[in-house]
């Protein structure tokens, strides 16, 4: 048995995704059903989800506040300073 539901999606995501679904010969509903089937089979979201690390949050805050930030004229100089 199938049920009908409606979802609100971002127009850009819908348009961009629909082009990909079309290339695979899938309707939007087919793609949603594939996603739901994968969730049901794996008992998880079928892609990695994560939150930013404390280090990334700290560095982002530094960039916003322009504190403890180093600027390099070339990537080679940045790599050298980082020991890479």
Image (cartoon, rainbow, N blue to C red):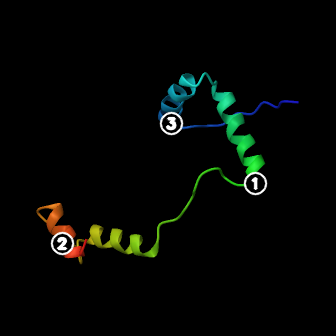
To which residue does mark 1 refer?
Answer: 43
Q: Does 64 sit left or right of 58 as displayed?
A: left
Q: Position of residue 26 (x, y in %)?
A: 63, 25
Q: Does 47 sit left or right of 77 as displayed?
A: right
In the displayed orientation, state which residue is furthest to the right. 1
The span from disc 3 to disc 2 (Cα, nearest Å) is 40 Å
**Whether residue 71 can be seen here:** no
Quarter-wise, where is residue 25 in the image? top right
The residue drawn where x is 46% and y is 71% is 53
To which residue does mark 3 refer?
Answer: 13
Q: Earlier in the sequence, mark 2 or mark 1?
A: 1
Q: Position of residue 15 (x, y in %)?
A: 50, 28
SS class, disc 3 = helix
In the rendered view of the protein, which quadrant contains the C terminus? bottom left
The span from disc 2 to disc 1 (Cα, nearest Å) is 45 Å
To which residue does mark 2 refer?
Answer: 80
> Foreground mark, 3 or 1?
1
Find out whether the residues at labels 3 and 2 contact each other: C-beta distance under 8 Å. no
Q: Does 11 sit left or right of 76 as displayed?
A: right
SS class, disc 2 = helix
Badge 3 density bin: few <14, some 14–19, many ≥20, Cα 10 Å: few
The residue drawn where x is 72% and y is 48% is 39
């Amino acid at each position: 048995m199938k049920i009908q539901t409606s979802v609100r999606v971002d127009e850009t995501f819908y348009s961009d995704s629909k082009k990909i679904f079309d290339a695979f010969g899938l309707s939007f509903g087919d793609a949603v059903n594939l996603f739901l089937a994968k969730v049901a089979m794996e008992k998880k979201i079928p892609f990695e989800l994560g939150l930013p690390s404390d280090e990334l949050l700290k560095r982002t805050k530094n960039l916003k506040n322009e504190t403890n930030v180093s600027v390099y004229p070339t990537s080679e100089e940045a790599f050298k300073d980082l020991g890479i």
